Image: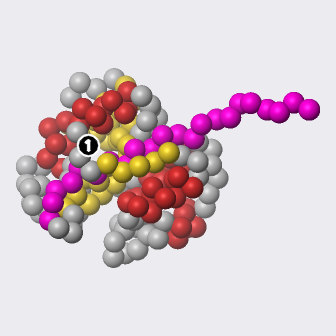
Amino acid sequence: MILHPYPTVTQRTRDDCGAAIVSSILRKHNIKHQYSRLCRELHVSDQTGTEEPDIVHFLNGKGFRAWMTYDMTVDSLITFIDSEIPVILIVQAYSRSRKEDRYEGLTNYGHYLLAIGHDEDRVIFMDPGLPFGSYGYLTKAELDKRWYYVSEDNRKLRVGIVVEPPRKNNLVHIR
């Protein structure tokens, strides 16, 4: 199993899972922040939650190299994880019937997860929606069914926000 631990952060409302994911990333890299201020800076709202471009813009402003991709595969996700690069995913968190095989067509249960590990059959996440912001997993088959976001023009997109950590500058000018 490959696992790159990230601090667990529990979302405080049903709409701030994106902020909780960003908080985990900041904590991993010892970047101090206040959660309530972070939510304001990310424009978290009870109507839309956290928008992906706001996450990308915020992380880039903190020295990360973050970008969105719309057609990521499970294999490319695994490649990033193997390179110690976490990826934020938008998945459908619930089905109407709460059965795992009924996610087709859902559009209103989007939820952010931070992909940080995997084994042969599963992808492991820091999930701010679990009790205590725990780690959870989806099988690769489950992830394949649930990993989509429906765009305004009704296309299903596999959104991933790739987050390369800031580069540490270990060079010091000696005077």
Observer-nearest of 11 and 85: 85
Q: What residue do we see at 21% from left, 29% from top?
A: 121
Quick one: 36 or 152, which is closer to the camera? 152
Q: Which residue is mark 1?
A: 72
Q: Is residue 28 left or right of residue 72?
A: right
**Is residue 151 found inside the magenta-colored segment of the image?**
no
Residue drawn at (44%, 52%), measured in percent from left and top?
Answer: 21
Whether 125 is drawn above or below 53: the answer is: above
Q: Position of residue 14 (x, y in %)?
A: 35, 66
When asked about the image quadrant of residue 28, the answer is top right
Q: Is residue 173 magenta?
A: yes
Residue visible at 30% across and 36% down?
77
Expressed as whole percent of the image width and height from the top left, the position of residue 17 reads 39, 59
Q: Using residue 75 as the reference point, say whether residue 161 is left or right of it.
A: right
Is the magenta region chiefly helix, strand or loop?
loop
Residue 160, above or below 117 = below
Residue 44 image point, x, y percent? 44, 70
Which color scheme is applied?
secondary structure
Q: Amino acid at mark 1?
A: Met
161 sits to left or right of 170? left
Q: Residues within 10 Å of mark 1 (few under 14, many from 20)?
A: some
The residue at the far right in this view is 175
Magenta stretch bounds: 154-175
Residue 48 position within the rendered picture, expressed as x and y whole percent measured from the top left: 34, 71
